[in-house]
Image (cartoon, rainbow, N blue to C red):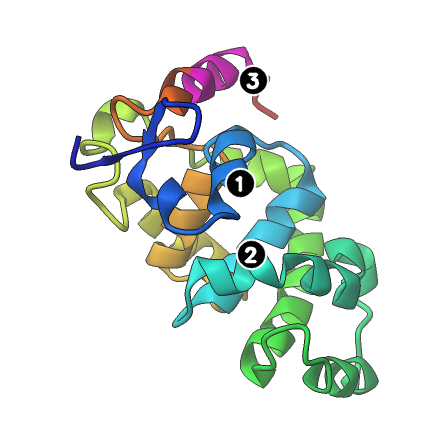
Amino acid sequence: MNDLYKGPDGHARCRWAGGAPEFLNYHDQEWGFPVADDQRLFEKLCLESFQSGLSWRTILAKRDNFRAAFHGFDIPRVATFDEGDIARLMDDAGIVRHRGKITAVINNARRAQDVIAEAGSLAKFVWSFEPAPETLGRPQTQSTSEASVALSKALKKRGWAFVGPTTVFAFMQAMGLINDHAEGCVCRAKAAAARKAFARP
């Protein structure tokens, strides 16, 4: 039970789901369930880059503010951001005001457009790095993997920023490219079923 937390409904969940009130719904409804929408994938990569050096609780609490500030992480729109937008974002107390990470989001939107032109969609590119389950360790025992290292290298080669292997692994966990729910977590089987039914892009 060391990896588990008993939720208010009596069901066991990943221990981190009990770390803050807002984590429970995120854990049960989003984390580990497969996503093929380019905008959601881009948003998550951006938010994971903002989390670097911070806690996910901080980023999750500000997620709606991030969405408003970056126009829902609409890739073509963010790709047009200029110095005026950077100044606006640096003045926005509702987000993490880190100039390097803000400029990385704008850069990465432009690089995402390149990936879409190359692969057909960001989802198709990202999901081509989905690892075989047997290449992974026991759930929640690693912070990187061969697949996250490979995807990180591929993104960096294409000019992306703030996409190191640890950031990318957290992205893969959250977006369902792997099922990293703890053994015994009530959502592990749900995520597995969702992944089985998921149509890979």
Q: Nearer the viewer, mark 3 or mark 1?
A: 1
Q: Which amino acid, mark 3?
A: Phe
Residue at the image position 81 percent from the left and 60 percent from the top: 71
Distance (Cα) linking label 1 and label 2? 9 Å
Number of numbered discs on residues: 3
Q: Tags 1 and 2 in contact by the CB under 8 Å rule?
A: yes
Of label 3 and label 1, which has the lower sequence position? 1
In this view of the protein, can residue 46 be seen by the observer? no
Of label 1 and label 2, which has the lower sequence position? 1
The range drawn in magenta is 190-199
What secondary structure is found at the residue carrying circle 2? Answer: helix
Relative image position of residue 151 (x, y in whole percent) = 42, 48
Of label 3 and label 2, which has the lower sequence position? 2
Query: Tag on residue 60?
Result: 2
Q: Quadrant of residue 142?
A: top left
48 is higher (above) or lower (below) than 1: below
